Image: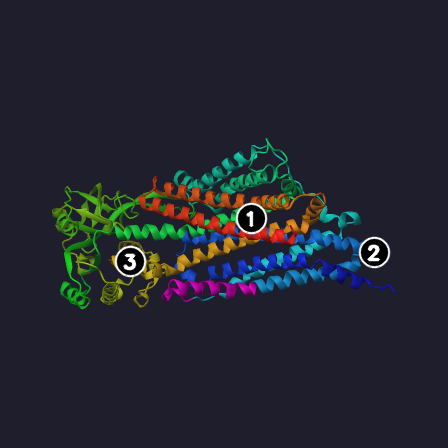
Amino acid sequence: MAQTINMKQMEQKLQKADRKQSGLYLFCNFTALMIISAYSALMFSPTVQTVFPEGGDSRKMMYMIFVMTLVGCVIFTIYALGLFFRHKSGQLGVLMALGASRRRLAPGLFREVFVLSGVSAVIGIIAGFPFVWIIWNGFKLILVDSSDMVLSFDFRCVVVSLIFLLLVVGFACLTAWRYLKKTNIMEVIREEHINEPVKELGRWCGPVGAFVLLLGAVMGYGAPAICHTWFHTFPPAWLNIFYAPVFVGLYMIMLHTVVHGWKSCRKNPYRNIISRSMMKFQGKQTVNNLIIVTLLIAGGCFAIFYIPMSAVSAMINYAGLSYDYFYKYRADQDVLGREEIETLGNKYGLSFKDWAECEYVTLGMGGLTEIYEDDGKHYHVEYVPMLEEEKILSEDAYYALTGQAADVERGTYMSLTDQDETSLYSNNSARELTNMVTRRQLDVEFAGFLHYDLLSDEQGCSVLNNEDYAMISEGLTDDWMGRMVRFNIDGKDSYRFADEFYDLYVDCFDESCEYPVFYDRVQKIREEEAGEVYWGDTDSMTKISYEQSDSFAFRTWWSYQPSFRVLNQNDFLRSMAVMLMMFLFIFIVCLITALVVCYTRCQTIVLNNRYIFDDLKKLGASPDFLCGEVRSQCNNVFKIPSLVGMFAMYLLFMMILYANDGRILFSEWMASLVCLAILAVIGAVVYAVYRASVTTLKRQLEI
């Protein structure tokens, strides 16, 4: 006896038959929301916000990659939604053909879409927090733990995820409404088999696209500098539009991949014809997917490159320091003397050599600076007397400290910088130096550079003629005078000694020295005498504390931070932990998302084209032939966007390194080689996932 089923039961049977596609949509939506939730949770965490300097390049990098990831996840979610409805349309068409009205189908369709989108999105948002916690604490457990690494959340970050959730649900409901509005039942039924071709351009579009991409990168990077230099204005945000050719070029490269491929088929035009035709059949979807993967791979590389660029440069610099220990202090501070330090060294079986000390004074130095116009956007360059603090050494003091003779003529000064002359603090525009107690001034001219790495990162350090030094420093009080000390360890150094010495050294300073290196006492005096409030007394960036002497902020910015080689080398990872962890997390997030997109795209081969492989098997195609077509399809999905993303970002990084000072330093070359090794590891991971995807597809296609 035939069983009669009603329309509701028919809907349930069709939904059950379509559960694989629903599961794929759930997985894509869940992944996108989990990634956005995790990224925003970590990005807005007080732990990260405290360490990343406001307005700094590292914070800008973090925000830029977040935008790239956000755009990629939006496009990925819309793609998954479109794929879901292309298959859902067949179900809707069957029900319409059986007499179901659109009004009858609407409640069930909207309910299913709302539940699938909403539930997967909410679970994804919630899962983002344990995802962050697991990765963060895994990093702490395996590599490093410090006072900076206490993870805390600011749950206002959920606003970003909720906006993304509303966007997902809104797009889902809008797409459902659009499909219900279609009137041609046969068109609805055959929706998933409708061709989505892209405009076929000539084989020139790939090479031209690569040129346009490179041109966009150069224009986008150079536009702010041109705006600042030529028009004397601070670059507005809209200048980022000059990066637009990057996306045009990227689209052309991926279009070439889909339409033509990168292997010449002139000798064998039928080679991989099946896989190439399948890519063209769903050209729009494929191009969009390849662009998303490229952006995510590029963003991940941009993040991971920060780690070797920071670590390798720092380690080379530490190894090249002239002395094991160097520190300075104000004359009004009761700092450990030589006997006390030697007594501490004896505790660890250490002896010292090459001990030297010298006196220095702090003066006000004039110079050129950028002055804001009334509109707050433009500026003009103006010479300002008493512009900033400058530490001054005499010729004799410089020789005692460095062992290098400095011949400085009267009425001139020589600025200290590193061997590569890349120091940011060198001032070559001063016309006078000012005694900040007596206000006596000394007219000077710039006479060139001296090179000494231990002083190159100080906020201004210069050498004067002995007679000029004695004259201008007369009458200074102890808070404007100080001493510098350096020495070596005779034999192997001890980290425990350096660590204890550092703690004792910090304890010697009182509250008057509790300020960062960019807190300028000369600028404070100048602005207060002009009736203004010095920004350093109101800005949170100038707040550091002796109680957090092991924190990244303190060790990076304290004005009297010493240079202990063994401490710097061993504590680099601990002091930079939060920053390195953030960029490592970004890399993991971007790479996982890219691989998920690639895998999802390859899965559509099974869902959309299974009947093609079945027909080929019936026509007698061998398993090797079918496997070759699967590999060819997956190869284009994984290989091209990965290569473009990796090497485009590598070239961009090299361009940035060169543009910084017109050359690439030895430490930067070494770091770039490490980045190449990282690219090789990324390539191996992508290849492993590619092989796993091919194996899975072959099993599903029963090849």
- The residue closer to the viewer here, 636 or 389, is 636
The tag on residue 247 is: none
- The residue closer to the viewer here, 179 or 5, is 5
Cα separation, mark 1 vs mark 2, equals 40 Å
> Magenta residues, as a range?
125-150
The tag on residue 98 is: 2
Question: Quick check: can you spot residue 82?
Answer: no
Q: Earlier in the sequence, mark 1 or mark 3?
A: 1
Q: Residues within 10 Å of mark 1 (few under 14, many from 20)?
A: many
Q: Residue furthest right?
A: 1
Main secondary structure along the magenta-highlighted residues: helix
Q: Are marks 1 and 3 in contact (CB under 8 Å)?
A: no
- The residue closer to the viewer here, 138 or 381, is 138
Cα separation, mark 2 vs mark 3, equals 76 Å
Point out residue 132 in the picture as x, y percentages from the top left corner: 48, 63
Residue 142 is inside the magenta segment: yes
User: Is residue 424 found left or right of 253 in the rendered image?
Assistant: left
Identify whether 71 is placed above or below 549: above
Q: Residues within 10 Å of mark 3 (few under 14, many from 20)?
A: many
Q: Residue sitting at 71 percent across and 58 percent down?
A: 18
According to the picture, the residue beneath numbered tag 3 turns out to be 568
Residue 278 is inside the magenta segment: no
According to the picture, the residue beneath numbered tag 1 turns out to be 292
